[in-house]
Amino acid sequence: MKNLLIIAAMALALSSCAVVASPLTGVIYTDMKAPLAVTSNPVASKVGTAEATSILGIVATGDASIEAAAKKAGITRISHVDYEANSVLGVFAKYTVYVYGE
């Protein structure tokens, strides 16, 4: 019985899921967009994106920072920031930041 408990505990500890930070998370599927930040600067035409991905919650890569998204679009004055969170069955997850500004 003790060995069975140890095996069950190890299986639980070693299993992981790819999840994304969001106010709502679907166990099977997540696909949502939401606001992240806002400034007093006027809305502008430039949009920069940056993303990070995760596979099984084991490997996560990318730079989904506001700074990275702003640099990609040449934005120096940020108007607002949105994000998008996607996850499928806890196997694959993606987090994307959208920066708007001039």
Image (cartoon, rainbow, N blue to C red):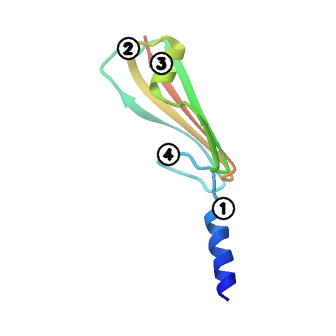
* Quadrant where the image shows the N terminus: bottom right
Observer-side mark, 3 or 4, equals 3
The mark tally for this picture is: 4
Q: On residue 87, which mark appears?
A: none
Distance of label 1 from label 2 (alpha carbons)? 43 Å
Disc 4 or 2, which lies upstream in sequence? Answer: 4
Distance of label 4 from label 2 (alpha carbons)? 26 Å
Observer-side mark, 3 or 1, equals 1
Identify the element where label 4 is drawn.
loop
Residue type, numbered disc 1: Ser
Q: Which residue is mark 4?
A: 22
- The residue lying toward the viewer, choosing from 54 and 7, is 7
Distance of label 3 from label 4 (alpha carbons)? 21 Å
Residue type, numbered disc 4: Ser
Residue type, numbered disc 2: Arg
Disc 3 or 4, which lies upstream in sequence? Answer: 4
Q: Which residue is mark 3?
A: 70
Q: What crowding class fits label 4: few (fewer than 14 Cα within 10 Å), some (14-19), or many (20 or more)?
A: some
The x, y position of residue 41, in whole percent, is: 33, 16
The x, y position of residue 74, in whole percent, is: 49, 10
- Residue in the image at 38% along x and 31% along y: 37
Name above or below for residue 49 compared with residue 31.
above
Identify the element where label 1 is drawn.
loop
* Quadrant where the image shows the C terminus: top left
Disc 3 or 1, which lies upstream in sequence? Answer: 1
